[in-house]
Image (cartoon, grey):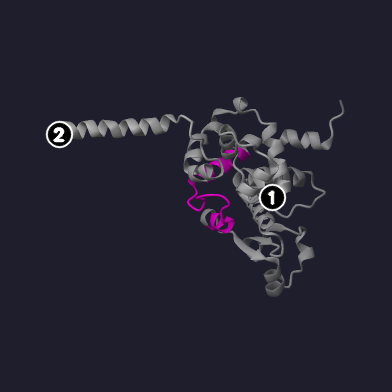
Amino acid sequence: MTMTFDDEMYKTVNYSKIYCKANELLVSSGAIKSFPFKVSSLIKEQSDIRLCKYSKAFEKYGVPIKNFGSESAVIMEFCGAVIIFYNQNEIDYRIRFGVMHEFGHYVLGHKFNLKGTDPLYHKQELEANCFAAQMLMPEQLLRECKNRGKNISIEYIAQSFNVSAEAATKRKRTLANTIYEWKSRAEREYDDIIIFKYASLINKIAPKRIDEYDLCDEYDRQRERDSWFADSRTRW
């Protein structure tokens, strides 16, 4: 079988590293409390990166949009600072994904300003997309929603996490090809914490059925019953 360039590129991507990097941020960030979250707040919390609209870049620096190499967003070192320039005229969810994609380049230690003809460019683009997808549509939350009986359709993902149909389609495809049992211990490390941290969102987009038996709820009820018993012994 002849190996194409795309096949080689996919084989060189360390998906586990990208996934774990995103999970660490999902757990540690105080800027992410639910979804969709404000990407600018996360970037400000985690870095010194500046955000700048394309229109402002043209107004302040005289740089036209065609010079950026992307109609959506781009990260570069400019005037002594690292800046993510973005197209303010795009739809909100495209801006969010584009900016998070560029932030992924920074988090993953990528080289900036690569040309499209550079083989490393395509690898870095794929890695940044994987990072953005996990940050904006965490696999753990989608899996928990599915466990609660929800149909994880393209429309469901797009509406629940405010992403484009295109991003939701790719996310659904990735999840369909992911076998949870094959994940490493490092990849599973933060699963429970992520589900617990964003429980309010999960309960909103995938409320539990009344007949579901929750061991955690039962544990809390038992603790309450124990406290009643302790109080009664004190009084009598």
Does label 2 or label 1 sit earlier along the sequence? 1
Q: Secondary structure at mark 2?
A: helix
Residue in the image at 76% along x and 65% along y: 65
Tag 1 residue: 111
Q: Secondary structure at mark 1?
A: loop
Magenta span: 18-44
Given residues 114 and 64, the one toward you in this image is 64
Given residues 32 and 19, the one toward you in this image is 32
Give the x, y percent position of residue 126: 72, 43
Horizontal placement of 127 versus 28: left or right? right
Give the x, y percent position of residue 54: 70, 66
| Disc 2 residue type (three-letter) | Thr
Q: What mark, if any, has residue 234 been given in the picture? A: 2
Residue in the image at 75% along x and 44% along y: 120
Q: Work out whether 163 lies above or below 24.
A: below
Q: Quadrant of the N terminus?
A: top right
Q: Is residue 85 magenta?
A: no
